[in-house]
Image (tube, grey):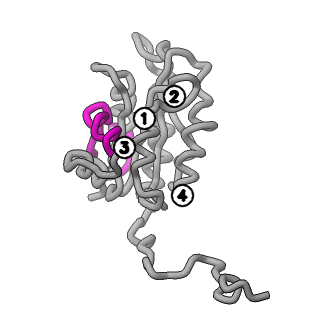
């Protein structure tokens, strides 16, 4: 059975960020047989900061990092502040090994007060995971405050579409094929060029 790590960067309890993460996880499980492991970043916020300052992860944070980097896929949901992902979310991504998400199917989601920030999915989150060589699902889900309430049909449709696309990526993914030789030379490396030969 595959494992999906669900990163939630919400700060409040209850959190609309966590609620969106749960909806995306449940809809994804309808399309692929997978076990879900939730990662609440607020619970390791001080550990993340200490890691940034000292370069060492606490045992609690090490477990969280392992959960994310050894998963078969990731659902990442963050609140949007000042038109971008939260500082807590970015700080967590910063402490991960840059190659640890290579080839990882990722579904991105975000929450915010107004629909105006929905583009943060495509100009902030998608480039971040693309830089890390993750495979980002074509559709992300943004939930504004107005999406919660008596009529969530529009949000539910967006969740279903994104999760179906993501589930297909998870079914097709085989991250085991991405195991690299740590002693292999970088692509395009030329010994002559490295020595300054013409």
From mark 3 to mark 4, how far is it between C-alphas?
26 Å
Alpha carbon separation for disc pair 3 and 1: 25 Å
Question: How many C-alpha atoms fall within 10 Å of the one at disc 3: few (<14), some, or many (≥20)?
Answer: few
| Residue 111 seen in render | yes
**Which residue is tagged 4?**
133
Q: Are marks 2 and 1 in contact (CB under 8 Å)?
A: no
The prevailing secondary structure element of the residues shown in magenta is helix
Position of 67 compared to 90: left or right?
left
Secondary element under disc 4, as helix, strand or loop, is loop
State if disc 4 and disc 2 touch (CB < 8 Å): no
Mark 2 surroundings within 10 Å by alpha-carbon count, few (fewer than 14), some (14 through 19), many (20 or more): many
Q: Nearer the viewer, mark 3 or mark 2?
A: 3
Q: Residue at 26%, 51% (x, y): give it.
A: 62
Residue on which disc 2 sits:
142
Instruction: Choose the circle earlier in sequence order: 3 or 2.
Output: 3
**Whole-number angstrom distance, CA of label 2 to CA of label 4:** 22 Å
User: With respect to residue 88, does 30 lie above or below?
Assistant: below
Residue 50 lies in magenta, yes or no? yes
Looking at the image, is mark 2 or mark 1 earlier in the sequence?
1
Which mark is in front, 3 or 1?
3
Q: Is 162 or 142 nearer to us in this picture?
A: 142
């Amino acid at each position: 059975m595959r494992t999906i790590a669900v990163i939630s960067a919400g700060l409040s309890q209850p959190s609309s960020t966590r609620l969106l993460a749960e909806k995306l996880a449940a809809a994804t499980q309808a399309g692929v047989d997978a076990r879900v492991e939730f990662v609440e970043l607020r619970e390791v916020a001080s550990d993340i900061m200490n890691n940034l300052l000292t370069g060492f992860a606490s045992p609690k944070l090490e477990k969280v990092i392992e959960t994310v980097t050894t998963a078969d896929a990731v659902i990442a949901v963050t609140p949007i502040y000042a038109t971008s992902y939260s500082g807590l979310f970015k700080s967590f991504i910063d402490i991960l090994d840059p190659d640890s998400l290579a080839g990882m199917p990722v579904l991105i989601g975000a929450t915010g007060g107004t629909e105006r920030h929905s583009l943060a999915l495509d100009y902030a989150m998608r480039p971040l995971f693309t830089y890390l060589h993750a495979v980002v699902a074509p559709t992300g889900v943004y939930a504004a405050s107005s999406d919660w309430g008596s009529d969530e049909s529009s949000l539910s449709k967006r969740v279903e579409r994104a999760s179906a696309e993501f589930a297909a990526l998870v079914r097709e993914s085989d991250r085991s094929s991405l195991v690299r030789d740590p002693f292999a030379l970088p692509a395009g490396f030329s010994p002559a060029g490295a020595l300054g030969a013409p």
